Amino acid sequence: MLTIEGSGLKLCDGVSRRSFLKIGGLAMGGLSLPQLLQAEANAGIKSSQRSVIMIFLAGGPPHQDMVDLKPEAPVEYRGEFSPIRSSVPGIDVCEHMPLLAQRMDDLAVIRTLVGSEGRHSAYQCLHGHKTLPQPPGGWPCFASAVSKLAGPVNRETPAAVALQPRIGGAFWSDPGQPGFAGMRHAPFAPNASGSKDLVLQGTSLQNLKDRRTLLKQIDYLKARLDTTDVIDGMDTQYQQAFDILMSGRLAEALDFEKEDRATRDRYGYGTTEPAGYGDAGWLRNEDLLVARRLVEAGARVVTLSFGRWDWHGQPHGTNFDNARDHIPALDQALSALLDDLKDRGLDRDTSVIVWGEFGRTPKINPRGGRDHWPSVGCALMAGGGIRTGQVIGATSARAERPVDRPVHFQEIFATLYHNLGFDVDHTTIDDMTGRPQYLVDHGTYQPLPELV
């Protein structure tokens, strides 16, 4: 929260240490806003404004009830939904996805996502790598890696923004960790304690402009901060932090209520009430609209969590009860996002990826649910110049395993890096020991040739 007030240890000029730290905090998962802001452009694409919007379906979406229906399978496998034809002959999707079916020309459907650890966690979708082993400093999330390599597009908008809510288990609300990219590249997470934290409280804009009082405290704080990574370059970063706050560009992007009514109607109106079983993210269509606004403002990577897709069955409602709520909401919001990006000329420069940490069991359990199934899952991709209007991969007759073209998580990350202009064969980031680390497993995974 941006606050020039409060109590606590008073520094020599009367400004409390607690208040000083709050100015930099701005709800970045415990990290300071200035830590995000040091621009380091190692890859020579700083002028590019290519971006990625990543939509995480927390809990694992049911692939066989969305994009890989098996109407000929026994009833205990095929479930309650029927397939409908899409705008691309031969590609059928769930009856609760009519809007996306009409936009199949703009989508690539991956039916054979593999490589899941089988853990309830946003980690693999955000970082690309498995949890273990970790190099010194830990793997940076995709957003932090991009921030490290390309820096911000402008001084007013962080390169990496995470809209994940602070609801339920940390394994789902994690905005992504900066790892060896450095804390200054941690994603900015306005939903961590509410977007209203961007409002100036208890001070005037003129008082904020006088940074000298605050910057004098850096030497004092050095003795109280645990890592040189936090303090490195803080003078410059605080200058940039205040530029962000005073420009209002970031706050403007987050304020989706300023959109015209017709646009908001297209996206639909979600809720911040806990979705699904009540222990994970919200089902908020507006966050996809905010993602578009952030891309326009200059964000390179925007991640968000949409709903709660872990449906094991009664007493919390069957897989199909919950799907009748979630799938139409995703259908409306994602369709609106694709249209919005195209209408604004942003679609070729903005990649969209929609996925979860794994798929669901082919056989419906006695409670009407589907359980965890890391053997195969699904993903939707759009934009960024990829070839759309196609399906990649095929599964067995009961959606149990890939029988054609398994696609690994890291192949998708390689594709996203490619869309942003990074060569995964040559681009590296140094870990904490100075050893260069490739963005994906070197020599093993490449961008999907079907798409690029």
Image: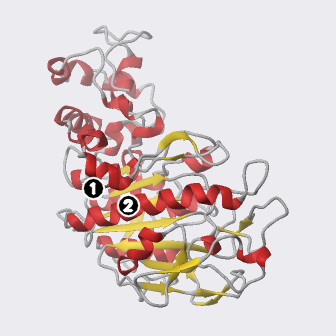
Category of crowding for the residue at label 2, using alpha-carbon neighbours closer than 10 angstroms: few (below 14), some (14–19), many (at least 20): many
Instruction: Give the spatial CA distance, label 2 vs label 1.
Output: 8 Å
Instruction: First in sequence, mark 2 or 1: give its number.
Output: 2
Q: Nearer the viewer, residue 274 or 253?
A: 274
The residue shown at (64%, 69%) is: 116
- Residue 308: x %, y % from top left: 60, 52
Place residue 364 in its image quadrant: bottom right
- The residue that mark 2 highlights is 53
Q: Where 182 falls versus 407 (above or below)?
A: above
Please provide percent x and percent y for residue 88.
41, 86
**26 displayed left or right of 313:** left
Determine whether label 2 and label 1 are within 8 Å by CB. yes
Q: Amino acid at mark 2?
A: Ile
The quarter of the picture where the C terminus appears is bottom left
Q: Is residue 239 above or below residue 134?
A: above
Q: Quadrant of the N terminus?
A: top left
Q: As displayed, is residue 142 above or below residue 409?
A: above
Q: Is residue 122 visible?
A: no
Residue 129 picture quarter: bottom right
Q: Residue furthest right?
A: 366
Instruction: Give the residue type that dot 1 points to.
Output: Val
Q: Position of residue 24 (x, y in %)?
A: 34, 31
Q: Which residue is mark 1?
A: 295
Label 2: element kind: strand
Residue lying at 67% horizontally and 61% vertically, measured from the top left? 320
The residue shown at (48%, 39%) is 29
